Image (spheres, rainbow, N blue to C red):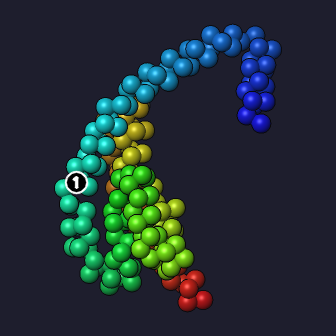
Amino acid sequence: MIPVMILGICLFGYLRGIRVYETFVEGAKEGLMAAARIAPYLIAMFVAIGMFRSSGALPFIAKLLAPIVSLLGMPPELLPLMIIRPLSATGSLGALVDIFKTHGPDSPIGMMASMIQSSCETTFYVVTIYFGAVGIKKVRHTLALGIMADILAIIGSVLIYNHLRAW
């Protein structure tokens, strides 16, 4: 299907009088320039995430927040996933796999973790890459709203799971 689509696009462009190969090369140049423009933001974010994970801050924060989330009916085992999900998709996938290995994917904690993984966004990654790509330096309210959306998605995931389980 994809080769047919590519041929169709090239044929459509040719029939409209567009110089297809030259246009493709210009687009590739713009793509490389965009990649070079966002590379410093990517490197800075990966270094910050690496420092956060290596410093031992994640288990420390998880231990601090465990009594609070327990009061809200959330398993404290989900805290590493909740903390790392807004930072990194790969890191949160690692946390999800750890939860699956420990508790099983069909366990209540595994199902809640799946819902959290699928309903939250990698907010810091998105803000870094997309805002960096277009040169926006002041994120204004975007970061606060993204984090708030992640928190609501986590709370919603746990509430929906608990409601469905009781039903």
Name, please, the residue furthest toward the bottom: 166
Screen quadrant of the C terminus: bottom right
Residue under the image location 43 percent in, 27 percent down: 35
Residue under the image location 46 percent in, 22 percent down: 32
| Any part of residue 162 in sight | yes
| Any part of residue 158 in sight | no
Residue under the image location 44 percent in, 70 percent down: 101
Give the answer, above or below, for where 117 lies relative to 47: below
Give the answer, above or below, for where 65 lies relative to 120: below
Give the answer, above or below, for where 78 lies relative to 83: below
Name, please, the residue furthest toward the front: 101
Provide residue 1's location: percent of width, then percent of height. 77, 36
Disc 1 marks which residue?
54
Provide residue 20's location: percent of width, then percent of height. 69, 14
User: What type is the residue that disc 1 sits on?
Assistant: Ser
Provide residue 124's location: percent of width, then percent of height. 36, 49
Disc 1 secondary structure class: helix
Provide residue 155's location: percent of width, then percent of height. 43, 73
Asked whether 151 or 66 is in front, the reply is 66
